[in-house]
Image (cartoon, rainbow, N blue to C red):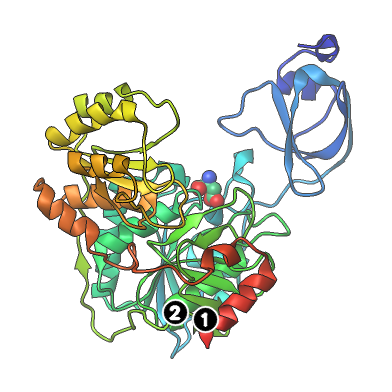
Amino acid sequence: MSEDFFQGYRGSALEVLKKFNVRVWGQAVITTTRGNFNGTVLPRAVNDDDKHIVIKIVTGYNVGIDTDTILDMTETGYKKANYKIPEKEFPFTKNLPKVKLLGTGGTIASRLDYRTGAVIPAFSPGELYGAVPELAEICNLSTEKLFAVFSENMGPEQYKKLAIAIGKEIENGIDGIVIGHGTDTLHHTAAALTFMVQDSPVPIVLVGSQRSSDRPSSDAALNLMHATTAAGHGDIAEVLVCMFGPTSDEYGFLHRGTRVRKMHSSYRSTFRTIGDTPVATVTRKGVVPIKPVYNHRRKDNKVKILPYFEEKVAMIYYYPNMQPDMVDSLVDNGYKGIVIIGTGLGHVNKLLYPALKRACEKGVAVYMTVQTLWGYVHMFVYDTGRDLMAMGVVPAANMLPEVAYIKLGWALGQTNDLEKVKELMLKPVNDEITPREPYNGYLIYQGGVREVEEFVQKVRK
Ligand code: ASP
């Protein structure tokens, strides 16, 4: 640690603020051993340590400043943020569809950056209407907060509860469902719901936002408008993910719940369909399908809810020199299913073979997917692949690794019969395995907006 690190005032965040007479919500100029900062002092979040002062700088980003580095602080102004969203009664408009928003948490549910600890969930219909009044022109919205978690805390329990809640809404005659969700594991939940809620008569649209609504570049409002449009007016009655299409706010994409993945840690256009095209684009004017075949909206209230999940399933990402104890420990700990994310066409090193053989012999369901994400597992090409298959490792075609993990949990939740598990795994519910990838789709999706546009035009013809 450098010498100058300790030149600053040493004390807790509160002591430092007191010493320099700066208040929380004060606009402060801060001189540190590492340069000067200017921003609003934010309240401390529950999980923050007391050795940092967090300020919001003009770009909207939050910066944590180590109190040990602070040399001086001056308060130049004071402006307490208004946490209260004006609650307005969500108006009822005859002839607009009824949409239910089920909330699970994530950035989309927070009004101010959640890292400040100053989270207020914009969630009741009145709060949402206050924040995004355009929603009232799209649908008659009702809301229910099922969970308030960041999506890394979603799991089988929540998937099952969500599936059951969706079933109830459908039976009660809702026209469309929107699920507010953190973006990090949105695609896991989308896959889980695709398997747990089958033959839905209405769209089930998962939506999140990459940037909280206090940021000028937030995608929360637009994503919500697109998601409610797709849920209330769209004809695609499937589990879909609705997020930014291009990097600009021209349109959203609707992705099939089994083919979608978060591909960028900060872009708003982070969700991409892998191995296929998105199902449709959506603007506030409506949904425009890209794929010609999809499940159409129906008038009945029938749906199949299959809320099963075996939790003793794991996913292992192969890396060179992986040791067999990685596999052995899963088997010894009673895991019933393993999804391997293999290299290239679906490979692991020879070291693992005896461990995988033992796993298969002990009745563990072992499936192979690929790290490349695009393309298929091909285990017939090399001897090694054939050897793995002979041991009982099952190639999972072009199923995305996370989807294979979720599907294996769902399949093993229903049966221990490995033949039945295999049948369930390899029979697609909704395109988790496709017969082929779109021509040049992989190349084009690595490009920018223009290429995507050209591709979308070509596919539409
Ligand atoms: N960590 C957050 C979550 O996934 C991020 C987000 O909501 O976008 O819940």
**Which residue corresponds to the image point at 8% horizontal and 48% vertical from the top-left?**
417
Position above or below: 92 against 206 = below
- Tell me whether the residue at label 1 lies in contact with that at label 2, contact meaning CB atoms closer than 8 angstroms: yes
Q: Which amino acid type is shown beneath numbered disc 2?
A: Lys
Q: CA distance from mark 1 to mark 2?
A: 8 Å
Residue 28 appears in the rendering: no
Nearest to the eye among marks 1 and 2: give it. 1
**Residue with the most extreme top position:** 3
Q: How many marks?
A: 2
**Which residue corresponds to the image point at 64% horizontal and 68% vertical from the top-left?**
246
**Residue with the most extreme left position:** 417
**What residue sits right under mark 1 in the picture?**
459
Residue 213's quadrant in the figure? bottom right
**What residue sits right under mark 2 in the picture?**
291
Camera-side residue: 221 or 447?
447
Position above or below: 200 against 390 = below
Is ligand 1 within 8 Å of the beta carbon of the residue shown at mark 2?
Answer: no
> Element at badge 1?
helix
Position above or below: 75 against 292 = above
Task: Bin the neighbour count of mark 2 within 10 Å (Cα to Cα): few under 14, some 14-19, many 20 and up.
Answer: some
